[in-house]
Image (tube, coloured by chain):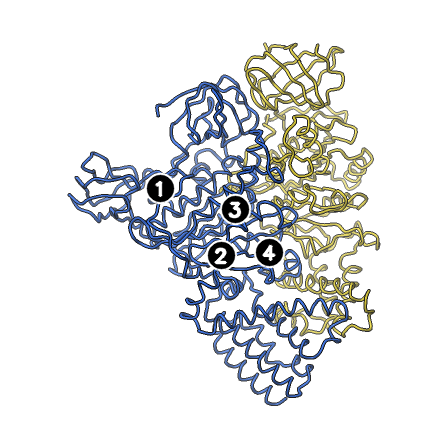
Amino acid sequence: MLKEYKTVTRVAGPLLFVEKTDAVGYGELVSIKLSDGSVKNGQVLDTSADLVVVQVFEGTSGIDREAHVKFLGETIQLPVSGEMLGRVFDGAGRPIDGGPPVIPEKRMDITGAAINPYARSSPADFIQTGISTIDATNTLVRGQKLPIFSGAGLPHNHIALQIARQAKVVGQESAFAVVFVAMGITSEEAQAFIRDFEESGSLNRAVVFLNLADDPAIERLITPRMALTTAEFLAYEKDMHVLVILTDMTNYCEALREIGAAREEVPGRRGYPGYMYTDLASIYERAGMIKERKGSITQLPILTMVGDDITHPIPDLTGYITEGQIVLARDLHRKGVYPPIDILPSLSRLMNSGIGPGKTREDHKQVSDQSYANYAEGRDLRGLVAIVGEDALSERDRRLLKFAEQFELRFVRQGRHEDRSIVRTLEIGWELLSTMPKNELTRIKEELKAKFYKG
Amino acid sequence: MARSTGTLFRIAGPVVVAKGLAARMYDVVRVGKERLMGEVIQIGGEKVTIQVYEDTSGLKPGESVENTGQPLSLDLGPGLLTSIYDGVQRPLPVIRAARGDFIQRGVEAPALDQEKKWDFTPALKKGDAVAPGVLIGTVQETPAILHKVIAPPGMSGSVKSISQGTFTVNQPFGELSGGEKLTLMQKWPVRRPRPVKEKLRPETPLVTGQRIFDGLFPLAKGGVAAIPGPFGAGKTVTQQTLAKWCDADIIVYVGCGERGNEMTEVLTEFPHLKDPRSGGALMNRTVLIANTSNMPVAAREASVYTGVTIAEYYRDMGYNVALMADSTSRWAEAMREISSRLEEMPGEEGYPAYLASRLAEFYERAGRVRTLQGAEGSVSIIGAVSPPGGDFSEPVTQNTLRVVKAFWALDARLAQRRHFPSINWLTSYSLYKESLAPWFEGRVSKDWTSLTDDLLALLQEEEKLLEIVQLVGSDALPEKEQLTLEIARMIREFFLQQNAYHDVDTFCDLPKTFQMMKTIKFFGDKAYKALEAGAGIQALTAMKSKDKLADVKFEKDYQKLLDQIRKDMEKEFASL
């Protein structure tokens, strides 16, 4: 029988301080019964012989010193089962779709252990998303974590949905699942996601975790861990290829900061705790593939950059952990270009292992490099034109300027339901590159030019 | 010190407090029922603060803590090469075989294979005196490397018995007069630098096969270099390319707090890489240390010390060792994280006040030295730095700059233009240039230094001109300056850009580097003269022969091509 304590000495922010307990384990799950009979959950953050600090997931409102605190003697575990597919859960893993409780096949610790680097296998399977700017220039591969760096008001959700709908490994039919994690997004946004899953018929292969804007902020700290535990179960025990969409990581980090502040920790940059890098790594690094296991976890975290600032600690630390980033640009969005993906600061670090002969096409890398180079130069010239006018430009510069324009309109821009194959994407690339004279395409080998150059 | 036990008092994340434990600073302790590995980092009254190298979830106050009485030490001996370790020298493949794909807590595994027998050849005989630095015998560790068993600091006496034969690392192969057993393995605490006879001036370059480094910003054997850059600028690729191609005898690669998938790339790729020097496997002279970002933060803090201690151990055998640390920022952040858990007064940006001294101490363990044995050896350190937001004014970059002498600044804008390696030639520098000049001039060509200076000056000039072009367009420039821009473009595209993924271009030896520089200079000199003689800039930039230079880097038999190009150039200039 578990002991109940009535020794709450202090309640501050999301934290509860309990005295005179028996030995309580670090990270243990806590159940708190309020005087009105309702129950809240929490987790031990700091434990010593004199004092235990508990973070309360549902917030501390209504808690008084009469509350009954029970330490459950185990760290947080999630009951998992293959039947979770098609279900909707709240941020703490309770079903909220009116369906029956999940009958667990297994209970798993939500913290998860680090994958032994030696046990990982290198991600190398090209995922075709049907979006040119991702497939051609920032290729996503299975087991990768590729975040979308967005800003308030940009269509990151549409892009995430389009990827979830269209993502496939060409020529391979395999068990595929989506784990969708909402952290602090509005119910309207969440509804849009679920509706889209329903319409495209993908809800029955999705697991949804919802912590909405009006749900307790501290709960956000466990929501992604529950979701990733589910993903690990589906990937490594049910052999599925799992795509995890996490939105919005910015809200997660805010919750982390809130806890740090409540514990009166020494703050790091912009008030975020000094361990935020390690904490984010413990989420992002759960993507990957393991040798001799069939499934995989691919992560697509979405974060809105505060004031569109890519050097803000959240996108900055994220970029140092993830294998690249897809950056959305406000000026492209204003021009009416969807998806407003700015390829210049975007990057996929695992691209080279997923493309080329036998995977996509032999000209993929060089088309990508040449387009990058031309587009970068063309964009730079826009600044010059603003000063000296287009007439002062050389022939070549004018061609580059035009290239940049057409690149945005024909290559970057596409429909929300337009699923371009990689071959089609590369064709468009060649159509644009062929507006330049052959000898100015210095990054492409002659034999490829002979084969693909148009005109 | 006798083994002492205490009890856990407080647990808050990776830092725990024990009571009643007799301990010295940096003693290794075993915490709790699962005997998690930890290290003493603060002593205050009867409370001892411990950083734990593993996840502490579930630990309770009252559990026992046992002091091993030893500082964090490594097992050094044959078998290190080809190994893959975590930050505290636990062999990852062994752990996987024993405990599965995920790293469980409380795993213990010997760092060196305890079963494997090594062929030992003694270098001493009965009655010989033994003192620190004396060569006791040798073991062929891998086809590429002869492992020298050298008397460790503190050992002295005379040989009572010694025998040839096969031994495991712990099996004594001899005995000293004082009764001390001789084994292949020795221990050394990671935080203490291994002693040397004297430090020497770095005079030979660490040849990297990368044109921008060897040509413009060379590193000396025993030198220290920092590669700072924002994410996505190519730090990791550069580090890996250097590890593959630099002419050190031994490579120690430390993945400190980096990405799991990238570490896997290293772990899967390295064992298949051919050693460009011996033709065998590159792994035969490599030690990999992998502590990814989601592995315990305290072990990350230890990982760079583990790396440098192994590097010093091989240096003491007279080898040239190159240590790549990717990334030292993650190491600094680990220090910060632990420091804030200790509630220490923070310095700049929350980093502990001792950040600068720790960084300096670490880099100071590099150097070209005379070993106790009297041989020459060196440890070169190449540390990646990941400044937040790519801002080089942050504390880790700045404090690193104070100690390193070669600075290879990565530039995200170059990476975006797909200019690789994206080293900014204007902000980078190497203070070894001067001390290495005699070597380059003696071994490659007496023109080496003046040629590299010319190239750098041209690039500097280009930067100035580009500012003007930004305002008025390139056509408004005088013809002479348009030509300068063209030559600078040739340097950037034909010489500085190097493709790490191309079979031939990935490595460029010094003669080739020199010849390429020389041909560009050859064109430049002729072109300026032709311009003076009245040739038009259009005709010069339209010359076909110079564009052929683009192919040189991809050509194995480059000399023939270069000769042809020079001939064609002469012809074209003559016809102007």
* Letter of the chain shown blue in the rendering: B
Q: Which residue is mark 1?
A: B76
Front-most of A271 and A410? Answer: A271
Residue found at x 36% / y 53%: B377
Q: Which residue is mark 2?
A: B242
Residue found at x 49% / y 74%: B515
- Residue B250 visible to an observer of this rendering: no
Give the letter of the chain under mark 1.
B
Lower position in the chain sequence, tag 3 or tag 2: 2
Task: State the separation of the CA atoms marked 3 and 4.
Answer: 23 Å
Q: Which residue is mark 4?
A: B410
Q: Residues within 10 Å of mark 2 (few under 14, many from 20)?
A: many
Q: Where is B288 relative to B505, above or below?
A: above
> Viewer-nearest of labels 3 and 1?
1
In the picture, residue B351 is in which quadrant?
A: top right
Q: Position of residue B2 (x, y in %)?
A: 35, 23
Q: Tell me, yes or no, whether dots 3 and 1 are on the same chain.
A: yes
Q: Position of residue B135 (x, y in %)?
A: 26, 48
Q: Colour of chain A?
A: yellow
Q: Which residue is mark 3?
A: B264
Front-most of A289 and B105? Answer: B105
Give the letter of the chain under mark 4.
B
